[in-house]
Amino acid sequence: MKTETEKTPFEIWKELGINKCEAEFSCGGDSMNDMSFSYYNKKNQKVEEANEKLDWYFEDEIYNKVDFYVNSDGHYMGESGTVYIELNEDDEDDLCFGYSKSSQSEWYESYSAKIEVKVDEELFDFIITNVRSMEGGNNDAVVVNYKKDCIIEDVIQEKFDTFVEELIELSYDCEFECDGESSDDVRYEMEDLELVGNKEKNTLYFVVSRGFYEYKDEE
């Protein structure tokens, strides 16, 4: 009679009445995360004893049979899912395990949209005359690039501060044509103000960009 250490994984699998194994995994950021194995019999009941007897085999062998995409590039973030393992018993002399992976990949996409901010005529004229560009995001202070040195009166500064608060609020409330999960990465910018400002409406236009996490089913 064979000892436990002498038995093959195929023999242990059949002895325990295992029907399938499900390996839950996640990877990304240039590395594999933890992987867990669950074994089930034909009644879909867990076979707890199998972990200590078979994990050692599949923890190594699964990487020889399945490709996992761990390398992230800022656009592709990683993947997670399940590898299904079953015993192929078509040939008793050539037993083998079959592996099939079902996963979702995670991607980071940036989407853009336009918003408009209405101001009064005095502030509009000041911005168009003195400001070259504006940008900011992620709750950072707005960066203002001036065309020239200028003195900002208190009343203008007060209006400008109110305008910036509204700009930040509108940028975070901006809607995008995307079904992904939004991140906190929000940027807004306005350049060439003489072209994007609407004098008749005293309105300024900004381009808002926001990052989204999207998930795609992989075959």
Image: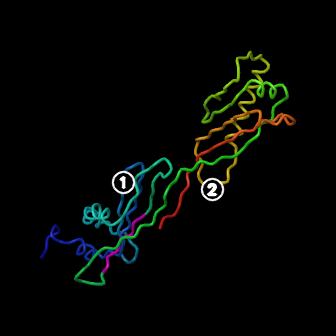
Task: Give the vertical position of 106 relative to 150 (above or below).
Answer: below
* In-image side of 3 versus 124 (left or right): left
Which of the 4 image quadrants contains residue 139?
top right
Disc number for residue 179? 2
Q: Quadrant of residue 10?
A: bottom left
Residue toward you, 122 or 183: 122
Viewport quadrant of the N terminus = bottom left
Query: Which numbered disc covers residue 34?
Result: 1
* Image height of 218 relative to 193, above or below: below
Q: Is residue 149 left or right of residue 9?
A: right
Instruction: Give percent across and percent down for residue 5.
Output: 16, 67
Write the residue at 26% across / 78% down: 95
User: Residue visible at 75% across and 38% down?
Assistant: 205
Q: What's under tag 2, amino acid-wise?
A: Asp
- Earlier-in-chain disc, 1 versus 2: 1
Camera-nearest residue between 95 and 129: 129
Comparing marks 1 and 2, which lies closer to the viewer? 2
- Kindly report the secondary structure that dominates the magenta region of the rendered protein: strand
Q: Secondary structure at mark 2?
A: loop
Q: What segment is highlighted magenta in the picture? A: 82-88
Tell me which amino acid carries mark 1: Asp
Q: Secondary structure at mark 1?
A: loop
Q: On residue 115, which mark appears?
A: none
